[in-house]
Image (cartoon, rainbow, N blue to C red):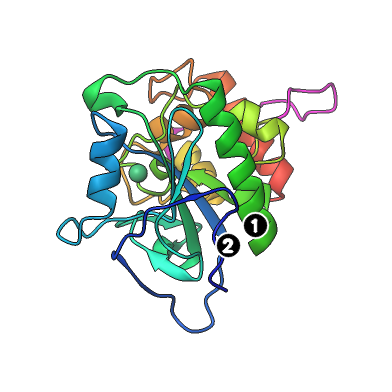
Amino acid sequence: MTRTGTGCIDRPSPNHGPRPDGVGVELLILHYTGMPTAESALGRLCDPEAQVSAHYTVDEDGAVYAHVPEDRRAWHAGLSSWRGRADVNSRSIGIEIVNPGHEFGYRPFPAAQMAAVADLCLDVMGRHGIAPADVLGHSDIAPARKEDPGELFDWPGLAARGIGLWPEPTTADDPADDSADSAEDVAALLGRYGYDTAESRILLSFQRHFHPERLTGEPDPETLRRLRALLRMTGR
Ligand SMILES: [Zn+2]
């Protein structure tokens, strides 16, 4: 399969390789570009010297650039791990989303951009049978190194369209939150969900994705409630 999404602007990158035999695409990883301009990001993603790429980039106006065919292994995740498995590049599709990022003036993602991101994600998920729970941010799989796409990203809006998960509100049936979680307990829960417990900042990364109003790195009750809700929703 060499197809890329419909309506994309071809902007090929030489930075890719074969996927290992027998390894299918099972994760969709969302990034921000973290460069001052869209053009600087597109240039870098296509520069052989840079040795980085993604399958797609979505600009702030909703334009989608296709860099690497989906059947090829793009170089977007770097050292990363999810649910005990490293080499995320081999088993994922990577989408870059234009935003200057925390280094160059982090700002909200425009509605037109998010609409294009959602359409592209649904296309990719449909082509590869990727489950909603397997749509993640770069910061989820590389918490010590990465903050993207960050706390301004509209994960709840995407989840409303079936892209990624958003923790359900508490219901009357919820088991009481009776354990006085030690730091070790919280790390174990995060590990059960998928985070690499050998990494630092995993609770902060969890909050950046699932409780962005509270980037403390501390296990407050609402953060824990959301983590437990996700474990329940996924049966992990
Ligand atoms: Zn990234």
In-front residue for pair 136/75: 75
Residue drawn where x is 70% and y is 48% of the image: 234
Say which quarter of the image contains residue 128: bottom right
Image: 79 above or below 152: below
Residue pointed to by mark 2:
26
In-front residue for pair 163/11: 11
Residue drawn where x is 38% and y is 20% of the image: 216
Can residue 176 be seen? yes
Q: Picture coordinates of residue 221 (x, y %)?
A: 57, 20
Q: Does the magenta stretch include residue 173?
A: yes
State which tag comes first along the sequence, 1 or 2: 2
Q: Is residue 27 magenta?
A: no
Q: Is residue 87 left or right of 50 when viewed as pictured?
A: right
- Local crowd size for mark 1, using a 10 Å CA cut-off: few (<14), some (14–19), many (≥20): many
Q: Is residue 236 left or right of 23 when viewed as pictured?
A: right
In whole angstroms, how far apart are the C-alphas of marks 1 and 2? 5 Å
Q: Picture coordinates of residue 213 (x, y %)?
A: 48, 15
Element marked by disc 2:
loop
In-front residue for pair 57/95: 57
Image: 188 above or below 111: below
The N terminus lies in which quarter of the figure?
bottom right
Residue pointed to by mark 1:
130
The amino acid type, in three-letter code, at marker 2 is Glu
The boundaries of the magenta stretch are 168-184
Q: Do the residues labelled 1 and 2 touch (CB within 8 Å)?
A: yes
